[in-house]
Amino acid sequence: MDLLTVLSRTFFDIPSMLEVLPQLLSTGLVNTVIISVAATILGTLFGLILALMGISPSRWLRIPARLYTDLFRGLPSILTILLIGQGLARFSYQIFGPTPYPLGIFALSLIASAYMGEIFRAGIQSIEKGQMEACRALGMSYGRAMRLVIIPQGIRRVLPAIVNQFIAIIKDSSLVYLLGLMTGQRELFRVGQDAAVLTGNLSPLLLAGLFYLIITVPLTHAVNHVDVRYRTGRRRMTAPQSGLKEVDEVQQKPAPALTGGAINPLITERGQ
């Protein structure tokens, strides 16, 4: 048996892929999207609060936000998921029952909020200070100016980074399987892994990886396209023509020749 045959049977066993495909679509893909979207929404809300705390004049707000960000950005994602999923299982059981599904979403949202907070903070601080001064001069309160003027512009500037963080959450959602999800709650990786164990080859796991690529690669190219469009503008701007050009043309025109005994009135006035 040659090497190509072994690789083909190990990674590209079509019958094994077709057998697990319905489960990947109906269970794995659906749960991956639910976990990722829910964690992103919660992480975005928590991250925006962290960003506002991080730029607050009060150090009682800045220091906790800094500590939180350093903590969850410094810990490995797998460690955070295990600590949250196993440490809070008793409290979660009283609310959600024996399923660790909500704890996995909560753990991912804590991780995402630490990164989202830094993204939002960078976007807000990139806005010129003169805009806040102009808003205050118009009689707007600090909160209203942030809500209506500063924050929307800051979010628009960091939109590519937000989408990149969403892609990272999609990939990190594969770590939730460590909490022991039920059969109907398995995400793409867990479905592919279980099928790989049953079939004895890695083709189902490779198919699960292809699903991740189908989700993340188009998002990556889309956010790059949006970033380029935002930076360059949808239309090529042309520089406005200066009115001085017309003045220069008038000055460069030769003065009309004097005929007869006519005297230039400008020369007369200057002579006087």
Image (cartoon, grey):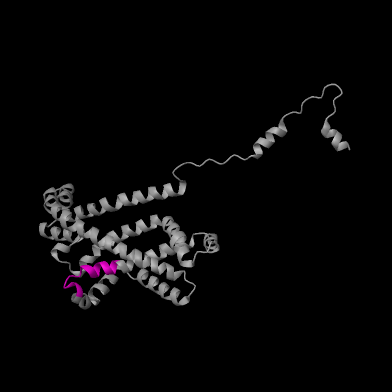
At 46% from the left and 46% from the top, the residue drawn is 232
Residue 209 at x, y percent in the picture: 23, 54
| Residue 101 part of the magenta-drawn span | yes
Image quadrant where residue 94 sits? bottom left
Q: Is residue 107 left or right of residue 15?
A: right
At 30% from the left and 67% from the top, the residue drawn is 109
Given residues 242 and 27, the one toward you in this image is 242
Q: In this view, does 216 lie to the left or right of 161?
A: left
Give the overall secondary structure of the magenta segment.
helix
At 47% from the left and 76% from the top, the residue drawn is 59
Given residues 133 and 14, the one toward you in this image is 133
The answer to whether one can see residue 136 in this image is yes
Residue 64 at x, y percent in the picture: 41, 75
The answer to whether one can see residue 202 in this image is no
Given residues 28 and 253, the one toward you in this image is 253
Q: What stretch is highlighted in magenta?
A: 95-108
Image quadrant where residue 101 sits? bottom left
Residue 205 at x, y percent in the picture: 19, 56
